[in-house]
Image (tube, helix red, strand yellow):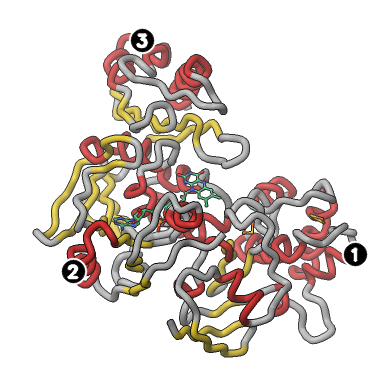
Amino acid sequence: MIPAKFDYIKASSVQEAIGLLDEHGFDAKIVSGGHSLIPAMKLRLSRPEVLIDISGISGMNTITEEGNEIVIGASCTHADIVKSDLVNAKLNMLAQTAKCIGDIQVRNRGTIGGSLAHADPSADYPATVLACDATIVVEGKEGSRSIAATDFFLGIFTTALAEDELITAIRFPKVTTGNYQKFFQSASRFAVVGVAVVKEGDAVKVGVTGVSDTPYRATAVENAYAAEGSKAAEHATDGVEVMSDHFADEEYRTHLAKVFVKKALEA
Amino acid sequence: MQITMKINGQTYSHDVEPRISLAQYLRETVDLTGTHIGCDTSGCGACTVHVDGAAVKSCTLLAVQVNGSEITTIEGMANGSELHPIQEGFKEHHGLQCGFCTPGMVMTAADILKNNPNPSEAEIREGLEGNFCRCTGYHNIVKSIQHAAEKLNA
Ligand SMILES: Cc1cc2nc3c(=O)[nH]c(=O)nc-3n(C[C@H](O)[C@H](O)[C@H](O)COP(=O)(O)OP(=O)(O)OC[C@H]3O[C@@H](n4cnc5c(N)ncnc54)[C@H](O)[C@@H]3O)c2cc1C
Ligand code: FES
Ligand code: FES
């Protein structure tokens, strides 16, 4: 399978990439690892006329500690995150999440920025960025802005990113009391259900992916946790429209969501 | 677009269409047909090669994306007539039957052992999750990689 024809430009700076996005509008697409975009282009689900490769932009693949935060460059691969000593020590649940993605080869190529921008409803990172209250840093024609994870995901493959914006980094508060639990789709290895939990004293923050067409914070669970403990997992899908497909219908997916929220609360 | 890359230590330069995958480029332009295309949809791992030392699925990479990189394919593993310890493992332990998946298995195994020179059986199996074999049932592939780990650590 060969994608439709396109022009390829390797951007050497964020400014150049933004300029190209602005110039070409809807006809252009950013490519990072290419591990969501290229399969879509082969299937003609996506037909950009101009591909702007951001993988050569320096400074976008670093992992640094800044005060109380760990800052992950958008071009960091899943493998960079799994192997980072800093992430393993101070944001272990992100390493745990990245390790669940695809396989060795996919992790060597796919990036965190690409995954968040793509907003696949079965992707893993969304649960973790939500539970951690991470901030997505984006840059566009109008300059830079920060988007709270809870405001970032708008729907299936839809985010708060404007057409001329790219994600440059993700800022995470340091978290040492969190975990990610995943029920793997047996063929693709994507998440049928993925649950991230951050514990702060008696409070919990719960991010859920795979269950609905938009990843969400299970606020009903968070509110009930102080009184009910891990039994609060029964509220995993309260107020949520649960997806149904040939891997898991609505009833089964709802059941899995409760089981995996419980597992993450008790881990 | 003109691209230049080092493949198995030798520099190649070609004018390619941006939409051509690295797998296709290696097989059809460079004539290195050891890299196989099984699914062409990033599922089977037969097309695995190393880009700057890391295993990737070359069917899901554009050749232009790796312009300037160093590539290693299965053809670059042996040293003349001397097999790489992973290849030797596959030969000793019957790690292949039809052989279609083998180039990808060997390249992924090299990544596993590079990052974890002493993997447990479970770690080897987990490391192979992106590589399919329709013949062997995997047991002998795991033994082959264990053989290579021992040899490389000796
Ligand atoms: C076999 C296989 C298995 C997989 N399994 C999983 C899994 O289990 N869990 C999971 O979560 N994912 C999985 N994935 C997806 C994988 O994680 C992708 O790497 C990821 O979704 C996209 O990252 P990328 O860098 O490859 O993005 P690309 O494919 O390059 O881009 C994806 C989209 O994001 C846009 N984009 C990329 N970078 C930016 C940026 N910095 N700013 C703005 N927009 C940007 C692109 O324009 C495009 O629309 C799998 C993929 C494959 C091929
Ligand atoms: S041919 Fe690339 S993964 Fe199957
Ligand atoms: S030996 Fe035939 S597919 Fe693996």
Q: Front-most of A140 and A255?
A: A140
Q: Amino acid at mark 3?
A: Glu
Mark 1, Cα crowd under 10 Å, few <14 / some 14-19 / many 20+, is few
Q: Which residue is mark 3?
A: A228
Return the x and y of residue B96 as percentages of the image width and height.
85, 59
| Crowd class of label 2 (few under 14; some 14 to 19; many from 20; radius 10 Å) | some
Chain letter of disc 1 in the image? B
Q: Depth check: A113 or A7 in front?
A: A7
Q: Residue at x 45, y 73 (%)?
A: B18
B10 to the left or right of A96:
right
- Label 2 sits on residue: A19
- Disc 3 residue: CB within 8 Å of ligand 1: no
Looking at the rendering, which quadrant does residue A242 occupy? top left
The numbered mark 2 sits on a residue in which chain?
A
The x, y position of residue A98, in whole percent, is 46, 48
Q: Is residue A51 above or below residue B133?
A: below
Q: Amino acid at mark 1?
A: Glu
Work out whether B94 lies above or below B76: above
Q: Residue at x 39, y 35 (%)?
A: A178
Q: CA distance from mark 1 to mark 2?
A: 56 Å
State the SS at label 2: helix
Instruction: Give, as a three-letter code, the residue at label 2.
Output: Gly
Q: Residue at x 60, y 69 (%)?
A: B23
In the depicted structure, whether residue A210 falls above or below residue B124: above
